[in-house]
Amino acid sequence: MRRVSNPLAGRILVAAGFLLSLFHLTIVVGLRATSAQLLVAVPPFLLSLGLVAVGVLLARGRLLPAQFAGRLLAWTCAGALALSALGAWLFAATVVGEVSLLNPLAAMVNVATFGALVGLLVGVYDVRGLERQRSIEQLNRINDTLRIATRELVDKTDRSELEQAVCDRLSESDSYEAVWIGRYDEDDSRVRPAAWSGFDDEYFESIDITVDDSPTGTGAGGRAIKTRELQCVPNVFEDPTMEPWWDLLEMHGVESLAVVPIDHEDTVYGFFSIYADRRNVFDDHERAVLAELGETIGHAVASIDTRDRLAERERELARQNERLDAFAGVVSHDLRNPLNVATGNLELAREERDDEFLRRAADALARMDALIGDLLTLARQGKLVDDCTRVSFRPVVEAAWLMVGSSAAALRIDGDLGVISCDRDRLQQLLENLFRNSLEHGTANDRPAADEGAESADPSVTVTVRRTDEGFVVEDDGPGIPAASRQTVFEMGYTTSDAGTGFGLNIVQSIAEAHGWDVSVGESPAGGARFEFTGLEPTDSTRSGS
């Protein structure tokens, strides 16, 4: 019947009505009796003509939407069969059973009994249809509420604003009397109301919900926090666990409620509670939608908390940069000035008399100057890089080598180095410290160091720079770094050289971290030291290396 079109159903009704009209007209014409008999025979003829008229309207699409034509035809057939069965039963009772129909009361009662049964069945069908319609309307309302609330979650960046917006949107629903959100902290056994809508402030400020084994902790709110599952109370006054709040709920006309936990991963942030003034409001589908909304709110709160922590981290880094600037000022002014005075006076003293003690003092002052220089560099290079620019990597490598390289060492650039998004000056400082580290510790494979000016001799160490898929590598063919020391080479003050300050590689790590890069140390293919930098921003010109 679902595929029956309006024109087809209309034609069927017109044909049936026409045949019935002919039948009843034949009876009317054939009757040559009193007007009372005509009064009984004419109405069926007129009703059959009405059937023809309805069929015409249906065929032209003026009566019902197309999807209901088959249903209308089915009900017409069912009515005809039902009343035909009634007529057959009355005929059988009269002819076969010899039951007299002269008693009008008996006839009316018989027809009323049959009509009551038919009306009951039709009523059941219509009630179920109404129930389905209401269920669809409720589903649409819930989905609209969820959509609006979800939109609020996307727009809000403050947790308090988000919570209040959710309460306001949910309380706009006709089925909900009030909504409130309670916050929960594991260090506090009490749920604190944070946002609400629907009732006066005094109600929510006076409500007492705990998360323990006391009477105020075994209700729906406490169970929602403990189990992290939605708690539905169809009738609050039939649930003994809700007794601590019966007076408050009765005062505000609350009959049923649902408490939905707000959580994300392993953290429970609290719950939102919805009140209704009728019993059995929350069906299975509505509970599922509300539970999903609770999870969505939990994700939003987690995102807000993450953003807040990042913002606080940025503020702390800004304060750290300020302290580094202050430290750099102290190093540059308060230490360098007296050092310069001491160095100047020592030079004057050595002009008059130069001995071993004065030479040792000069070496100590020179080392102190180097330490102060490294400390000043460390303070400045540790600051976060706020403004990166895209620079060609090869010129930076060559400039750094020009500052620290020597004829006893060689620089090898393996492949196209492409471009890097960085602070150019700090990247050059990083490379200078790495190159200086290789030169200070490099005597490759027992090869003799080249004499100054001896261009044909092999270099004592070769430093190689190349790009990788995730960054770049600086490695040499020197003696390398023992595996046991690779975790400590970046520590401040670590050195194996008497001339070293112990800050070089720590400065390298600080500059890398300021860019957001990761640096690791390992062994090169030639057995030397290998420093790999990853986490660089990819660029179109980046070339991968082996």
Image: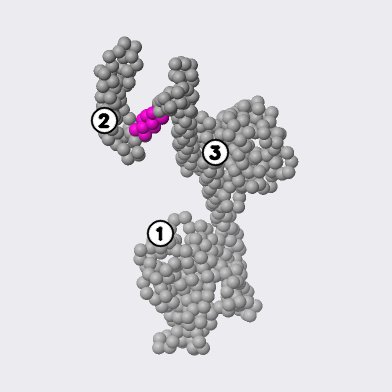
- On the image, numbered disc 3 is attached to which residue? 283
Q: CA distance from mark 3 to mark 2?
A: 47 Å
**Farthest residue toward the right?**
214
- Nearer-the-camera pick, 290 or 411: 290
Pointer 1 or 2: first along the chain: 2
Q: In the rendered view, tell whether residue 35 sits above or below residue 185.
A: above
Q: Is residue 144 magenta?
A: no
Q: CA distance from mark 3 to mark 1?
A: 58 Å
Question: Which residues are drawn in magenta?
Answer: 73-85
Indicate the secondary structure of the residue bearing disc 2. Answer: helix
- On the image, numbered disc 2 is attached to which residue? 15
Pointer 3 or 2: first along the chain: 2
- Nearer-the-camera pick, 131 or 464: 131
Q: Are marks 3 and 2 in contact (CB under 8 Å)?
A: no
Residue 537: x and y in percent read 43, 61
- Nearer-the-camera pick, 434 or 218: 218
Residue 102: x and y in percent read 44, 16
